[in-house]
């Protein structure tokens, strides 16, 4: 893909010992604007790192037209619960060959890997707090990421054909897709004022960074939430695509799951007074399995092993933060809903981690017949 760059290197001390699993931030230094953060994460056990980024990721501000980035690297360690910088170095004249560069061994001069000294006044994550558009997302970019990550997900899970007939969409919001079946059940027209209000409410209730993407099994489509995902790096987009491909496999290889999900979604009326919350909560319990496993593959394998410098960065605008704060104060259950959704990922992740033996991921297994009301779907 055009305008794609790939950088690699290795951190070591003066004796050649690897800086194993040290925290690393790589930015494009800008003289007039805040630095453009390109990669953020951990080095591998041998001290190496490599990652890809788009040209748009170092042209985040107006009037930036440079053809290659001015690289600056910051190495950090965690101390007292916070990241503390221990080394920094600039690379003003990197030789790029068809968008690829190798920094070779980067010697951390004066750094004791076992007991490093902190650098005062050096930001461990320069550019992270910057709210910026890093990617120009379209179907071609999503297809590129899917083509790269699908074989990895298939290898990790044992599933095949995850891209077969799969469609992609880039959308301004996930809400219309998430609410479609509930609106169908309620007889609400998608373009009506009621539908727009429900979508607006759902977006705000989701919280900052919620809803990066989703897989809709009923139209066999992965939808990318552009306002959020345009703020991440391309490696992070690949990770999220991989997360959604796990869901593709779950629905493809779990008998009855698609029908069970449809029943669940159509049981969620836009009018809370029409919903049996206890029944709905029981029906939604299976999402712990689905989201937990997708998060497990995402975090422990795609992010940790394949894309360790994948930049996940999302910052809500001041207006969004204000609206969400007001909603949390005025609408009962807003925070509880966010916490419940977050627990599907965190609790499910720990559940699968506890089952793992050795280095390979545990397989996904779900018997729909054992779910609440699931006997009717198998």
Image (tube, rainbow, N blue to C red):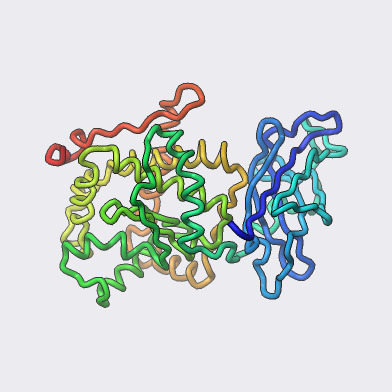
Residue 211 located left or right of residue 370: right
**Numbered disc total:** 0
Task: Please state the horizontal and vertical placement of residue 222, each as a whole percent of the image.
Answer: 38, 55
Please name the residue shown 26% across and 46% down the image: 284
Residue 246: image location, x then y, percent? 39, 42
Q: Position of residue 170 (x, y in %)?
A: 43, 63
Side of 134 relative to 187 (left or right): right
85, 360: nearer the viewer? 360
Please identify the quadrant where the C terminus is shown: top left
Q: Is residue 165 left or right of residue 314?
A: left
Identify which residue is drawn at 41% across, 65% down: 171
In front here: 175 or 119? 175
Screen quadrant of the N terminus: bottom right
Furthest toward the left, the residue is 376
View extreme (bottom): residue? 193
246 vs 373, nearest the viewer: 246
Q: Is residue 357 above or below residue 32?
A: above
Q: Residue at (14%, 37%) from the top-left corner?
A: 375
Using residue 231 as the reference point, say whether residue 205 is left or right of it. Answer: left
Quarter residue 21 falls in: top right
Location of residue 134 in the rendering, given as x and y in whole percent from the top left corner: 59, 62
Is residue 79 among the parts visible in the rendering?
Answer: no
Q: Is residue 211 visible?
A: yes
């Amino acid at each position: 893909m055009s305008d794609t760059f790939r950088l690699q290197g290795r951190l070591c001390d003066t004796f050649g010992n690897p800086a194993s699993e040290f925290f690393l931030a790589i930015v494009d230094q800008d003289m007039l604007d805040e630095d453009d953060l390109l990669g953020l994460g951990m080095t591998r056990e041998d001290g190496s790192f490599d990652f890809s980024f788009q040209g748009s990721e170092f042209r985040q501000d107006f009037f930036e037209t440079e053809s290659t980035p001015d690289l600056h690297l910051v190495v950090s360690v965690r101390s007292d619960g916070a990241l503390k910088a221990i080394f920094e170095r600039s690379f003003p004249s990197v030789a790029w060959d068809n968008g690829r560069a190798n920094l070779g061994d980067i010697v951390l001069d004066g750094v004791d890997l076992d007991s490093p000294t902190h650098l005062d006044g050096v930001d461990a994550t320069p550019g992270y707090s910057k709210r910026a558009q890093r990617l120009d997302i379209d179907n071609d970019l999503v297809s590129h990421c899917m083509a790269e990550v699908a074989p990895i997900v298939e290898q990790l899970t044992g599933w095949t054909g995850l891209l077969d007939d799969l469609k992609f969409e880039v959308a301004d919001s996930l809400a219309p897709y998430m609410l479609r079946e509930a609106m169908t059940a309620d007889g609400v027209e998608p373009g009506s004022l009621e539908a727009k209000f429900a979508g607006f409410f759902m977006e705000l209730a989701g919280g900052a960074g919620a809803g990066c993407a989703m897989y809709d099994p009923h139209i066999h489509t992965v939808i990318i939430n552009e306002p959020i995902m345009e703020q991440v790096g391309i490696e992070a987009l690949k990770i999220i695509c991989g997360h959604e491909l796990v869901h593709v496999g779950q629905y493809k290889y779990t008998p009855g799951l698609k029908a069970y999900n449809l029943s669940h979604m159509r049981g969620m009326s836009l009018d809370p007074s029409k919903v049996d919350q206890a029944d709905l909560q029981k029906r939604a319990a299976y999402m712990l399995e689905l989201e937990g496993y997708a998060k497990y593959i995402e975090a422990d394998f795609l992010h940790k092993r394949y894309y360790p410098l994948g930049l996940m960065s999302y910052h809500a605008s001041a207006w969004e933060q204000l609206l969400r704060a007001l909603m949390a104060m005025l609408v009962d259950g807003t925070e509880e809903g966010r916490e419940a959704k977050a627990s599907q990922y965190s609790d499910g992740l720990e559940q699968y981690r506890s089952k793992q033996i050795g280095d390979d991921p545990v397989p996904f297994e779900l018997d729909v017949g054992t779910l609440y009301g699931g006997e009717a779907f198998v």
